[in-house]
Image (cartoon, rainbow, N blue to C red):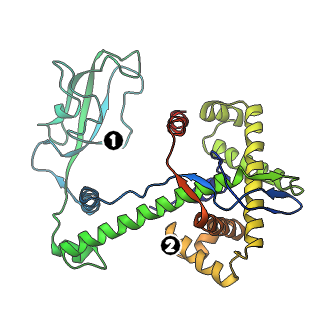
Amino acid sequence: MKKKLAAIAVSLMAVVSLAGCSGKLSNDYITINQYKGLEVTEVASAKVTDDDVEAQIESNLSATATTEEITDRAAEDGDTVNINYSSDFENSSSPDSGADLTIGSDSYVKANGDYKGFSEQIIGHKPGETFDIQVKFPDDYASADLAGQVKTFSITVNSISKSTTPELTDEWVKANSQDSATVEEYKKEVKKSLEKSKKESTNATLRSEVLSALLDQVKVEKYPDGEVEDQVSQMTDYYKSYAEQSQMEFADFLEQQLGMSEDDFTTEVKSAAEQTVKQKLAVDLIADKKKLTPSDKEYEKEFEKLAESYGYEDVDSLKEAATEDTLKSMILQQKVADYLIESCVQVEASSSTTDDAASDTAK
C-alpha cells in the first residue's frame, strides 16, 4: 500500500525532547551554541530473528491466498461468511451489502458462559438460510446498555467462501520473487529485507534524536518575516481539511478529535510553527557552513530514492503529492542529521528518561 506523504509533514514539524554538546555557529537569525558531539539516547539496532523471518514469510504467503466460493456445503470453522443480521437494539444491523465474518475469528461477541459465540453459531448453516441466535455480551462491554445482556440476532447467510494459503515451496518462490528460486534463497532474501527495514527504522530514530538534541542548542534572535505565519497557515489548513473531510465544524473537530479548544489549538500551532522554523534555520545554517547542500543532480537522485521509498511510480508522481521545496527540505534535513550523527554520543537511557518516555506514550 502506498505510504502517505503525511509522514513527510510530520517529520518536518516534529517536536521532541531535547539535549546537547559542542561547536558554535551563528547568523542574523539564530545562534547554534553547540552542534558537535551532541548527546543522544542510545538507539539500539534490533536483530532480525528466525521467528521474524518466519512471521514475514507467513504474511507474504497469506497475501497470495486464494478464495473459493462454497456452494455445496454448510459453513465450517475457518470459513468466511457474508451475512445480514439484525437485532432489537440500536446499530445492530449489518450494511445493506452484508458483512463479512470469518468463523472463529472472535471479531463479534465471543462465547460467554452457557452462550456460544456469535460466529460459531453460524456453523452448519447454508447460503440462503435465515435463523436466530442468542449471545451474551460480556459484563465489561463498552456499551453499558448491552453489558451482561442476552440478545437475539436474526441472521441470513448470503454466501460462504474459504481462503487457502499456499505452502512455501520452490514453485511458489519462483512465482512470487524476482531474486530467489528456492525456499532457502527466499528465506535469506526476506531476512536481508527485514534487516534493511530495521536499519532504516534505527537511522530514522537516530536522526530524530540528534535533531532534537540540536534544537536545545539553538537560540533564536529573530524569525524571518512571515515564515512562522506561513507555517501556522499551512498547519491550520491541514487540520481544517480533515474537519471538512469528516463533515464537521472546525471547533467540533478540534474538541472531539484533538480534545482542545480553538484558543488552545492556536497556541499549540504557533509553538509548533516556531519550532519548525527554528529547526529549518538550524539545518540551513549547518548545511551552508559545512557545505552539505546537495547539487541539483544529487537532489534528483534523492528524489528517486524517496519516490521508491514512499511507493510512487516515479519522481513526477512524487512531486504531484509534495512540492519540490518540501522534498528538498526533507532531504537536506536528513543529510544534516547524518552529519550530526557522525560526532554524536549515544548514552544509555536513564530511569527518569525511560519513565518520561513511558508517560509521554501513555498520554
C-alpha separation, residue under disc 2 versus residue under disc 1: 38 Å
Residue bearing the label numbered 1: 98
Q: Quadrant of the C terminus?
A: top right
Q: Amino acid at mark 2?
A: Glu
Residue bearing the label numbered 2: 308
Q: Residue at x 28, y 28 (%)?
A: 109
2 and 1 marks in contact (CB < 8 Å) = no
Query: Which circle marks residue 212 in the picture?
Result: none
Crowdedness of circle 2 by 10 Å Cα count: few (<14), some, many (20+)?
Answer: some
Does residue 4 appear anywhere in the picture? no
Crowdedness of circle 1 by 10 Å Cα count: few (<14), some, many (20+)?
Answer: some
In the displayed structure image, the side of residue 144 where residue 321 appears, left or right: right
**In x, y percent, where is residue 313?**
51, 74
Nearer to us in this view, 330 or 308: 330
Q: Residue at x 34, y 59 (%)?
A: 47
Q: Give the vertical position of 274 relative to 66 (above or below).
A: above
Mark 1 lies on a secondary structure that is: loop
Please identify the quarter of the rendering in which residue 265 is found: top right
**In x, y percent, where is residue 215?**
71, 52
Please identify the quarter of the rendering in which residue 325 is found: bottom right
Q: Residue at x 40, y 23 (%)?
A: 142
Does residue 278 appear anywhere in the picture? yes
In the displayed structure image, the side of residue 331 where residue 82 appears, left or right: left
**In x, y percent, where is residue 139?**
32, 16
Which of pointers 2 and 1 lies earlier in the amino acid sequence? 1
